[in-house]
Amino acid sequence: MKRLVIGILAHVDAGKTTLSEGLLYESGSIRSMGRVDNKDAFLDTHELERDRGITIFSKQAVFAFEDMEVTLLDTPGHVDFSAEMERTLQVLDYAVLVISGADGVQGHTQTLWRLLKKYQIPVFLFINKMDQDGTDKELLLEELKKYLDEGCVDFSMQDGGNFYENIAVSDEKLLDEYLESGKIYTGGVREVISERKVFPCFFGSALKSEGVHEFLKGIETYTREIEYPAEFGAKVFKISRDSQGNRLTHLKITGGVLKVKAVLKSGDEEEKVNQIRIYSGEKYQTADEAQAGTVCAVTGLTKTKPGHGFGMEEGGFEPALEPVLTYKVILPEGTSASVMLPKLRQLQEEEPELHIVWNEELQEIQVQIMGEVQLEILKSLIEERFDTSIEFGTGNIVYKETINNTVEGVGHFEPLRHYAEVHLLMEPLEPGSGLQFDSSCSEDMLDKNWQRLVLTHLQEREHPGVLTGSAVTDMKITLAAGRAHLKHTEGGDFRQATYRAVRQGLKQAESVLLEPYYEFRLEVPQQMVGRAMSDIERMSGSFENPQTEGEMSVLAGSAPVSEMCDYQKEVIAYTKGQGRLFCTLKGYEPCHNAKEVIEKVGYDSERDVKNPTGSVFCSHGAGFTVSWDQVKDYMHLDSQLNSDGGNLNEDDTVRQTYTEEEFIDTEEIDRIIEQTYFANRKQKSGWKKKKLERTIEDYKSSVSRAAVKKTSGKKYLLVDGYNIIFAWDDLRELAKANIDAARGKLLDIMSNYQGLRKCELIVVFDAYRVAGHDTEILDYHNIHVVYTKEAETADQYIEKFAHEHGRKYDVTVATSDGLEQIIIRGQGCSLLSARELLEEVNLASQKLREEYLDKQKKERRYLLDSVSEEEREKLRNLKETNE
């Protein structure tokens, strides 16, 4: 039996869902046809869809007809949900495009046609609502040929010379066959349809079941069986959750066989398939395996997302449709953003076009969407699933950035005991290309594993531009060179170097601000075309020469979304309801008022601490920051661009003169940046309780652990800064007036103390409440100062240090935190309470004063000590004479 996956697409209100019901009914899959207005359509399973009478989520149904088994994928028709539709296209064998005979080819219909062409999907057309007055088959066919493709052929009447002639002109081989025999065999027709040279058109009325059976028969006759390879492959096109909350990954098997309990690998992730479900409407059947060509939903996969591929399909796809509007999410009073954000992330898994964004600077949740209808649906979904009523602020445009010239971005990350350098070639691409990544770096220069890691870091996030901080696009980034250190390089080093290389390249480039543009078709009475043309020019749009259709004039062109998004209301007003405006997203083009937007946003790339443009180098054991415009004066590898902007040959690449920087002869904190995320300050007490339970056994065995032989000569003292400040009376009083002064005084005291103790002294301060703060390590005279990053406490940092170094070196921790003392003791470290540390500091100060006075006393010199005995005798005689 021939197995096909067919998607059904349409502009909203074209009758797509009604046709789906008709196909299921004609095939015998359902006993009676449901209706959208009766809220009982088989595939509109969600309450929101039934209430609004539109398809919001893609669904599937399985039916058999004669010698054909079809998995029918119903997709949303409304333009606001077109991203959901686009994700479905990647798994289709054929598509059915439904067009309303009363409306003809509309703007969104042309967008759908372009997407079908992009994914090279063969198309059958069903022109619906032909029972309505005013519909003309011949005029509609001419419109299809004009606005879609000359290959649109009427298949509703398959007899006669005209039918074969229209097919024959699409292919030379078929033309020769027709001229010789006077007809064309079915196999040849199937081929030109699958090659997208011919697009069969059927006419009818789905609501009245007119032409539906003939259409279904035409699909069965003129589609060819798909051949799949033996090698396993699968494409993910949707994520959803069932009524019990189980996460479902919807995919199509494109090769081989998928079995229950199979382990799927995507990148570095491996997960096991627990269950395979074959859905039809709301119901499903489980299966032990799924053959190639099957569309199914599997449980057990938690890391997948739409566009992921498995096996031979690994690599994914880039959607052409993207959100263009951004709105602030206004939460009800008493609802925390930290609680709501993970819930919205869950929705984003299912509907990636939502683009949930946490704005760190404004401390607010933002959502990027396609249009206002989608906004209403999102609000209803959140209230239904999470029982939370939210509102939205005023919509703003989603801008993007790109570059105009080729540049080389350099990123270097070399704080003490870390090392990575990355060189990236950044080239502009055609509009709509998105971001593309490649590597031309020799494996002799940088190991393949490190290269893969760099490419992963390039793809794992959106990279902010330097004009407004908007995401960059339409650019190819090629890894041209890189260097790792045999001893000191870790994975996180290349993340830092890669991000900095992108930013450094953008700072050099000619950046261009992009904004979304609509492609529009405006129909107005002829006497009002002048007003319409003026409006388009005012909106910085462009248009072709007006066309006349009856009493109406038609303007077609493009204009910025920011200017045209509310124009529909104006058209209705000045044409008194006679005018019509059809808008579809064209893509991103240079912003028409870039200077104004940039000034309004007020983004300063130099002050964006989360996305630094400079690099970190090391000299004489200390890391220092180099600004982006001076990085190339310090980089260790030669430039990979010729003076004319071309790429160097591999033979010309690098100088092999790198020598290890001189490091101070002490062991630093090897993984100072790696700490546990998500340490919620409200849960700190709960976290401590868990730590206490986990470390009881460590505490019991602390004596034996402390007995482990440690490396001599390596001594550390870690001081919990704020714990000590608030434990010492004088510092606590000073902190009430000025916390900075208290910190400074503690550091001065510790500097003096270190001079006597002669150890590596590290003072650790909490900075976990500071949003966006990264771990910061400073040298203060003869001691080290650490400010922890966001979501990391000082005791967490100290505990990890103790765990990594407490059994090798002589480590002492100064703190009065009772739980922390237990944890530290369990790692074999010594302890000092705040009181004991104060006593030691006072003793050290007293000893320092005594040594100083004693030294001064010993070094006291008199005049007579420096003269000879003879001269001394003369001086005594002189003294006696004077007396």
Image: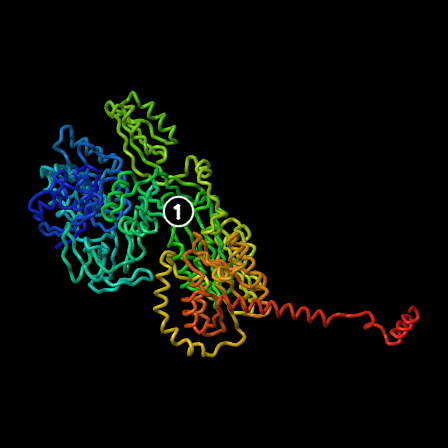
Q: Along the horizontal axis of the image, is 467 left or right of 660?
A: left
Q: Position of residue 81 (x, y in %)?
A: 26, 43
Q: Is residue 182 visible?
A: no
> Within 10 Å of the Cα at label 1, are there few (<14), some (14-19), or many (20+) other Cα atoms?
few
Give residue 145's position: percent from left, percent from top.
23, 36
The residue pinned by badge 1 equals 363
Residue at the spot 30% in from the left edge and 60% down from the top edge = 266
Check the image and report above or below for 361 versus 616: above
| Quadrant of the drawing holding the N terminus | bottom left
Residue 269 at x, y percent in the picture: 31, 62
Q: Between 261 and 10, which is closer to the camera in this rendering? A: 261
Three-letter code, disc 1: Gln
Along the line of sight, the residue nearer the viewer: 662 or 379: 379
How many tags in the picture? 1
683 left or right, relative to 754: left
State the colouring used for the structure image. rainbow
Q: List x then y, in percent, for residue 229.
A: 23, 59
Instruction: Classify 544 as above or below 685.
Output: above
Residue 51 relative to residue 791: left or right: left
Q: Residue 153, can we see it?
A: yes
* SS state under label 1: loop
User: Furthest residue to the right?
Assistant: 881
* Residue situated in front as seen by the camera: 626 or 154: 626
Most foreground residue, 777 or 479: 777
Residue projecting furthest to the front: 883
User: Image height check: is 623 above or below 153?
Assistant: below
Taking the view exactly as shown, the residue that stands out farthest to the left is: 31
Q: Is residue 574 left or right of residue 709?
A: left
Which quarter of the rendering shows the C terminus? Answer: bottom right
